[in-house]
Image: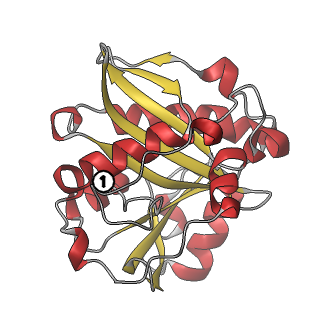
């Protein structure tokens, strides 16, 4: 999966009981909904082909899920991560509550995964984290959810979806590559160390511009008339 969202300044497994004051009002529009009219309320809940249900969720549900299942999802000892942890603040909680979008994946009544994302600017949507329990991985959940996000965001004029992945997460890099995400850079963070940045271009013009400027090995012959990459 992608890197874990930075939602806690305390050690994993030692978080204080959160205040429900920060539970999101799902009727309030997020930044993506305000910018693009993203129809989360119309697009969710969504039943995937596996029977898993994707639903809108609140910040605290996502936060608690990640804190509880960090090790089994990411196979990373939290003590091995960079030691810097930004302090929790009302501003950060407010960001996750009012700016970000949160989604939860249920198999029956069991919560098996979460996704958090937010608008970065007027044309970019950033998937901050997607995390699935081991038993929910490899079932196409991520692929179907991303396809659904594209179907909602592309018509609204969003040009790209971005995500960051730990370099050692080869499984996730391959999965994203199959969905036509392209590496667009690397990033060094005091919170996460080294990260690989990837983007899926929703605009053919944006993909052509990127290919022309930065992808010497991706010629125009690899892009069809609709601007979509072929399976090569």
Location of residue 161 in the rendering, given as x and y in whole percent from the top left corner: 58, 54
Q: Is residue 130 above or below residue 221?
A: above
Kindly identify the residue that appears in the image at 65 percent across and 36 percent down: 24
Instruction: Decide which of 192, 170 is in the foreground and name it.
Output: 192
- Residue sitting at 68 percent across and 41 percent down? 154
Q: Secondary structure at mark 1?
A: loop
Crowding at dot 1, Cα within 10 Å, few <14 / some 14-19 / many 20+, comes out as many
- Examine the image and state in which quarter residue 217 appears: bottom left
Residue 1 location in percent, x, y? 30, 53
Residue nearest the observer in this picture, 82 or 39: 82
Q: Residue at x 16, y 60 (%)?
A: 75
Instruction: Tell which of 189 and 217 is nearer to you.
Output: 189
Quadrant location of residue 101? top right
Q: Decide: is 83 above or below 129.
A: below
Q: Height in image: 163 above or below 43?
A: below
| Residue at the disc numbered 1 | 1
State the image coordinates of residue 178 (x, y, percent, origin top left).
33, 50
- Asked if residue 112 can be seen in this view, the reply is yes
Q: Position of residue 206 (x, y in %)?
A: 68, 62
Q: Is residue 56 left or right of residue 230?
A: right
Residue placed at 45% from the left, 58% from the top?
Answer: 181
| Residue 179 in view, yes or no | no
């Amino acid at each position: 999966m992608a890197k874990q969202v930075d939602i806690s300044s305390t050690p994993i497994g030692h978080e204080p009981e959160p205040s429900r004051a920060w539970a999101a009002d799902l009727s309030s529009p997020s930044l993506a909904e305000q910018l693009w009219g993203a129809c989360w309320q119309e697009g969710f809940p969504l039943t995937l082909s596996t029977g898993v249900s994707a639903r809108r969720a609140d910040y605290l549900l996502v936060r608690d899920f990640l804190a509880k299942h960090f090790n089994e999802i990411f196979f990373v000892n939290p003590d091995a991560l960079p030691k810097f942890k930004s302090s929790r603040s009302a501003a950060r909680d407010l960001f996750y509550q009012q700016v970000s979008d949160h989604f939860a994946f249920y198999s029956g009544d069991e919560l098996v995964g979460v996704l958090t994302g937010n608008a970065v600017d007027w044309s970019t949507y950033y998937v901050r984290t997607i995390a699935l329990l081991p038993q929910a991985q490899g079932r196409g959940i991520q692929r179907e959810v991303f396809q659904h996000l594209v179907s909602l965001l592309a018509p609204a004029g969003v040009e790209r979806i971005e995500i960051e992945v730990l370099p050692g997460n080869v499984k996730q890099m391959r999965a994203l590559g199959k969905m036509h995400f392209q590496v667009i850079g690397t990033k060094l963070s005091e919170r996460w160390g080294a990260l690989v940045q990837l983007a899926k271009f929703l605009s053919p013009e944006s993909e052509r511009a990127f290919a022309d400027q930065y992808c010497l090995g991706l010629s125009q012959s690899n892009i069809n008339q609709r601007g979509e990459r072929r399976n090569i």
